[in-house]
Image (cartoon, grey):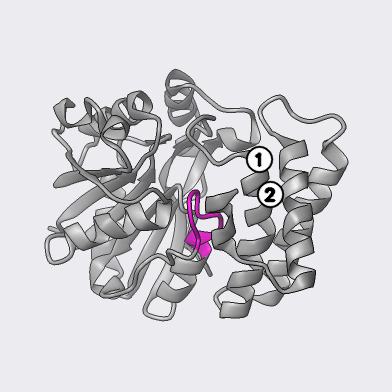
């Protein structure tokens, strides 16, 4: 048996976080504990009274800082830490499948599940929609174990023995943007990363409590350039991600999706490109924008 703990970082969405965390009580293999890290008392209001009585803590605002707080709290206590976004709904056998995979493959350092649905691409799902998608699609997902270069941060299970002192880069502030690639690319030097349809769930993609369009647009450039220079994202992938985002913002700004601030993102892209050309590009700049 492994000691498996779930960690959730949340800002501005206490009601949603409470609902998704309470759903973990329905796991066929319950978590050994749940840690929730907010930035203010309001971020975790009412969560500790939930079904699983999660431990609620505070850290300076920022996904990397909040996840690092969870890592520090669970060091020496957990064998596996499972990071879920506060808007992720796990399939009922998620933790059981993770435990089986880690026990069967001691060299695996991290696992990410194949999604039965990602609301980020569709304007967001409700919890009932997510549960319906899980019921309808999880058995259709490919059970093959696939090697990964990096993991998707909305759901990733990590072996603590491989993490050791490794932490999320706090130079990527607020929402983080590509912090999952940076962290798990570094983790991949210590053990294998995999994905499989045996582990699944739905990312609701709920809006609210997130970074503004302008800040996110700046991060779409600044964070990727920073990670490319740092050497934790391949140059080819960095260029692909950067220009894909810029082109999407340019093309869609005149007719944006209702749930995306394309104009704000485009303005942020422009500010970042200007800073890149003048040597002032810094991911941390969004904290003062």
CA–CA distance between discs 1 and 2?
6 Å
Image coordinates of residue 218 in percent, x first then y, are 67, 54
Image coordinates of residue 177 in percent, x first then y, are 55, 54
Q: Which span of residues is magenta-colored?
A: 172-181
Image coordinates of residue 193 in percent, x first then y, are 43, 68
Residue pointed to by mark 1: 213
Query: Which residue lies at the image location 63% right of the left edge and 75% below the top edge?
Result: 228
Q: Are marks 1 and 2 in contact (CB under 8 Å)?
A: yes
Question: Residue 253: which disc?
Answer: none
Query: Which residue lies at the image location 49% right of the left edge and 32% below the top edge?
Result: 204
Q: Is residue 24 left or right of residue 260?
A: left
User: Which quarter of the figure has residue 167?
Assistant: bottom left
Residue 44 falls inside the magenta stretch? no
Q: Is residue 212 left or right of residue 153?
A: right
Residue pointed to by mark 2: 217
User: Which quarter of the figure has residue 71?
Assistant: bottom left
Image coordinates of residue 277 in percent, x first then y, are 79, 70
Query: Which residue lies at the image location 18% right of the left edge and 58% below the top edge?
Result: 73
Residue 68 visible here: yes
Query: Which residue lies at the image location 12% right of the left edge and 61% below the top edge?
Result: 77
Question: Relative to 129, is 35 above or below?
Answer: below
Q: Could you tell me which secondary element the residue under label 1 belongs to?
A: helix
């Amino acid at each position: 048996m492994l000691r498996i703990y779930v960690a959730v970082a949340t800002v501005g969405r206490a009601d949603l976080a409470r609902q998704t965390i309470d759903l973990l009580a329905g796991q066929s293999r319950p978590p050994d504990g749940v840690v929730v890290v907010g930035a203010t008392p309001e971020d975790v209001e009412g969560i500790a009274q939930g079904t699983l009585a999660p431990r609620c803590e505070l850290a300076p605002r920022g996904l990397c800082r909040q996840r690092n707080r969870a890592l520090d709290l669970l060091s020496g206590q957990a064998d596996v830490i499972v990071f879920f976004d506060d808007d992720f709904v796990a399939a009922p056998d998620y933790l059981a499948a993770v435990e089986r995979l880690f026990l069967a493959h001691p060299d695996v350092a991290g696992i990410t599940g194949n999604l039965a649905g990602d609301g980020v691409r569709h304007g967001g799902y409700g919890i009932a929609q997510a549960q319906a998608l899980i019921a309808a699609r999880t058995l259709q997902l490919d059970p093959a174990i696939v090697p990964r270069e990096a993991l998707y941060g909305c759901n990733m299970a990590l072996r603590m023995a491989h993490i050791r002192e490794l932490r999320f880069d706090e130079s990527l502030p607020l929402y983080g943007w590509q912090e999952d690639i940076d962290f798990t690319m570094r983790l991949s030097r210590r053990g294998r990363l995999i994905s499989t349809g045996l582990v699944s769930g739905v990312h609701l993609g709920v809006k609210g409590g997130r970074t503004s369009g302008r800040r996110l647009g700046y991060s779409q450039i600044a964070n990727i350039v920073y990670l490319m220079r740092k050497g934790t994202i391949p140059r080819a992938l960095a260029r692909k991600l950067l220009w894909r985002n810029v082109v999407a913002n340019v093309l869609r700004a005149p007719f944006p999706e209702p749930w995306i601030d394309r104009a704000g993102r485009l303005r942020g892209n422009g500010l970042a490109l200007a800073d890149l050309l003048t040597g002032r590009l810094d991911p941390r700049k969004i904290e003062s924008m």
